[in-house]
């Protein structure tokens, strides 16, 4: 699909693979210009090539979401491409993968890394792009049911803590950006067959991404400050 320079611009982190890449595919198919970011240069270049081969207007920039100057540089780059209609914070890590780490066994560096990448990175990126967000823009924080306090159990301490903090960003930012009509929501994609979710996950990547795309493409006046799965509210 060829799109004009006036097409809405979406910035998507974690777009080298998994849910971020599929979100880019789906937004591209809806006519968005795509600004994609991830850490690994080779995987990001492959994603860029694939999206361009589908006919999408796509640019790519590497970023380490754990490193503040890199996040600032990403924001500066994206704002330079035009007003942002949409920001999808999909980059994320599940530290100690497969270990279901308990509070007592969690490693200091895993807890710090999860909070840095999954929560502080999105906070820093929002600050870096805030002035370049269009009125009625959408911000989607890709969160997780593992960050929901209501039915929180043991294990996954670092990841849970980071996603609960990401949900704090959603709530506070939604209130603060409401005067500009900007809609900020957390989305849980469910348990998805990605590198992170693993082969036993219950949902396809396309199924998981559809709820992210739903929140990214909300019309002006749509919900803000919510926690959703498949477009339906879930408990915090
Ligand atoms: N899969 C699930 O079941 C599930 C469930 C609930 C929530 N989620 C959330 O959904 C989001 C996407 O997950 P996924 O399953 O698609 O994971 P994934 O396949 O492991 O992909 C993770 C993405 O995040 C990027 N990333 C990781 N660390 C980064 C860093 N420091 N700086 C920049 N980019 C970084 C990766 O880039 P590189 O390729 O460069 O490493 C990759 O693009 C995450 O926030 C995750 O927590 C997933």
Image (cartoon, helix red, strand yellow):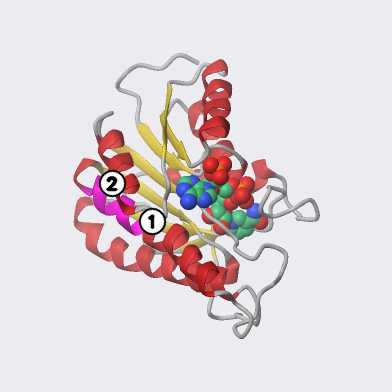
Residue 170 vs residue 79: left or right? Answer: right
Q: In this picture, is 179 found above or below 69?
A: below
Residue drawn at 33 percent across, 59 percent down: 123
> In this image, 206 relative to 86: left or right?
right
Q: Are marks 2 and 1 in contact (CB under 8 Å)?
A: no
Q: Which residues are magenta?
A: 123-130
Label 2 neighbour load within 10 Å: few <14, some 14-19, many 20+? many
Residue holding disc 2: 72
- Whether residue 189 is visible: no
Where is residue 115? Give x, y as percent: 45, 66
- The outermost residue toward the bottom is 104
Q: Is residue 94 magenta?
A: no
Viewer-proximal residue among 218 and 91: 91
Does dot 2 land on a helix, a strand or a loop?
A: helix
- Sort mark 1 into few (<14), some (14-19) or many (20+) by Cα contacts within 10 Å: many
- Label located before the other in sequence (2 or 1): 2
Label the magenta part by its dominant secondary structure: helix
Is-magenta flag for residue 125? yes
Drawn side of residue 217 relative to residue 146, left or right? left
Q: What residue do we see at 57% from left, 16% from top?
A: 53
Asked whether mark 1 and ligand 1 are closer than 8 Å, the reply comes as yes
12 is higher (above) or lower (below) than 5: below
Instruction: Name the residue: 56% across, 63% down.
Output: 144
Label 1 SS: helix
What residue does disc 1 label?
Answer: 121
């Amino acid at each position: 699909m060829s799109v004009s320079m006036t097409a809405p611009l979406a910035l998507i982190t974690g777009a080298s693979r998994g849910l971020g890449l599929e979100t880019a595919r789906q937004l591209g198919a809806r006519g968005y210009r795509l600004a994609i970011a991830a850490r690994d240069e080779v995987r990001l270049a492959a994603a860029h090539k694939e999206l361009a081969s589908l006919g999408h207007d796509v640019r790519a920039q590497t970023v380490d979401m754990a490193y503040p100057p890199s996040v600032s540089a990403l924001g500066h780059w994206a704002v330079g491409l035009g007003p942002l209609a949409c920001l999808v914070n999909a980059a994320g890590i599940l530290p100690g993968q497969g270990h279901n780490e308990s509070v007592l066994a969690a490693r200091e560096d895993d807890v710090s890394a999860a909070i840095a990448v999954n929560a502080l990175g999105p906070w820093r990126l929002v600050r870096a792009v805030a002035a370049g967000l269009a009125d009625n823009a959408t911000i989607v924080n890709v969160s997780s049911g593992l960050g929901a306090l209501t039915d929180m159990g043991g294990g996954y301490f670092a990841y849970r803590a980071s996603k609960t903090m990401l949900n704090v960003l959603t709530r506070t930012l939604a209130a603060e950006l409401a005067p500009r009509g900007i809609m900020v929501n957390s989305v849980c994609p469910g348990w998805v067959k990605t590198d992170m979710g693993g082969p036993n996950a219950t949902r396809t990547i396309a199924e998981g991404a559809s709820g992210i795309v739903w929140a990214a493409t909300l019309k002006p006046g749509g919900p803000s400050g919510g926690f959703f799965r498949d477009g339906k509210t879930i408990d915090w």
